[in-house]
Amino acid sequence: MSACSASAAPVAEGVVPFRGDRQAGIVTPAQDRLHFVALDLTTDNRERVRALLQKWTSAAERMTAGAETAPGGAVGGNPDGPPADTGEALGLPAAKLTLTFGVGPGFFDKLGLDPALRPAGLAELPRFTLDQLDPALSGGDLCIQACADDPQVAVHAVRNLVRIGFGTTSVRWSQLGFGRTSSTSTAQATPRNLFGFKDGTRNLKAEDGAELLDQHVWVQPGDGPAWLAGGTYLVARRIRMHVEIWDRTSLAEQEAIVGRTKGEGAPLGAAGEFDTADFAAIGPDGLPRIGEVAHIRLASPEALNGVRILRRGYNFVDGSDGQGHLNAGLFFVAFMRDPHAQFVPMQRALANKDVMMEYIEHTGSAVFACPPGLSDGQYWAQPLLEA
């Protein structure tokens, strides 16, 4: 697919182009806020779904440009009918809003699509050791990821797309996030998670180049059905972090569990955050300086036959759990070429060996296939529905 004219045209400050070879919101420099929603289809009528995706695409393109879902949508329509736009983003800038769309495993069966169109990578993820998955926080036939530097802009986008989908889709679950936990650009400082550690230091970056991103992030021709070539897979995991227990753990133990210093974020035994971790180094006690079950060792490409993923997660605090503890943690979002060849072995190693598992639990899980970007006139999932 060639880059479309809309992507090449000048854009206003704070506006991320909606159309292009890839969907925005993947290698786009990570914004500060997230509103993620997973939806279920409530119809098996393919034409109704096609019409909805056309409406969603039109509204999404307008909102990412800082406009209402439709011209005069909030106050310019029929005063005796509901407004076409809910209005809470009136007067706000686009705030680098991106909207990223994906389809889940159930999308194909519910619409009676040719089984050959369902990519093998969209198989449900296996259950991992210690998973405590809540079905109400897992799965979905469709997903929309809204990222922006203003939380109201992100919430407005999801709210209006959900509203447009009434009668064709229903919300299965959603998640708000703040304080991105990974950098997707070398221009960004590494953020911290709610355990206080810099997170995603070795994450893939937009500047890593086409060859590396093609190898690890973008689905290649021949990987599966043609409609997904140039797209990617999205894995979402809601990870509850037991911050109260972590906060009573010594600094030395925290650093040993992670394998990095808490202040600088350097691998143990190194000085700087981006220094190469020396997994062969032996400490004064005669043991590996970076422990055999340290988080950064288990998740490293060196331990996983070169596997890498593009992380794009966010912190969340969803009030308290009614027992005096914060319901808080990490909403893990990652993009990859093949979740079963990349995420599954990584998560299996962490679930089975990572001491950090004593402080966290995975409560939600989902996998989606994200089509490539849109050329002029295309709507979300058009190559799939018209295959």
Image (tube, rainbow, N blue to C red):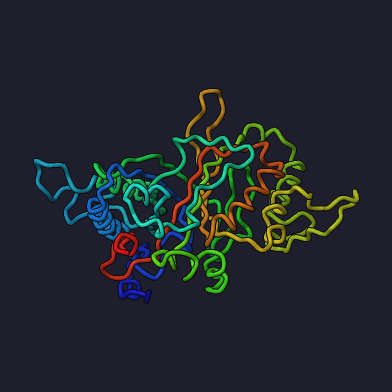
Query: From where the camera sits, is residue 68 visible?
Result: no
Percent across and percent down for residue 286 are 90, 51
- Residue at (61, 42) in percent of width and height: 128
Q: Relative to 139, is 44 on the left or the right?
A: left
- Residue at (39, 49) in percent of width and height: 143
Percent across and percent down for residue 344 are 60, 51
Q: Relative to 191, is 167 on the left or the right?
A: left
- Residue at (47, 45) in percent of width and height: 177
- Residue at (32, 56) in percent of width and height: 93
* Camera-side residue of 217 and 321: 217
Question: Which quadrant, please, contains the N terminus?
Answer: bottom left
Query: From where the camera sits, is residue 281 visible?
Result: yes
Depicted 355 relative to depicted 235: above or below: above
Depicted 278 relative to depicted 37: above or below: below
Percent across and percent down for residue 363 are 53, 37
Give the total number of marks visible in the rendering: 0
* Camera-side residue of 274 and 359: 359
Depicted 23 relative to depicted 263: above or below: below
Question: Which quadrant, please, contains the C terminus?
Answer: bottom left
Percent across and percent down for residue 366 are 48, 46
Residue 43: quarter of image: top left
Residue 37: quarter of image: top left
Residue that sits furthest to the top in the current view:
323
Q: Relative to 114, is 238 on the left or the right?
A: right
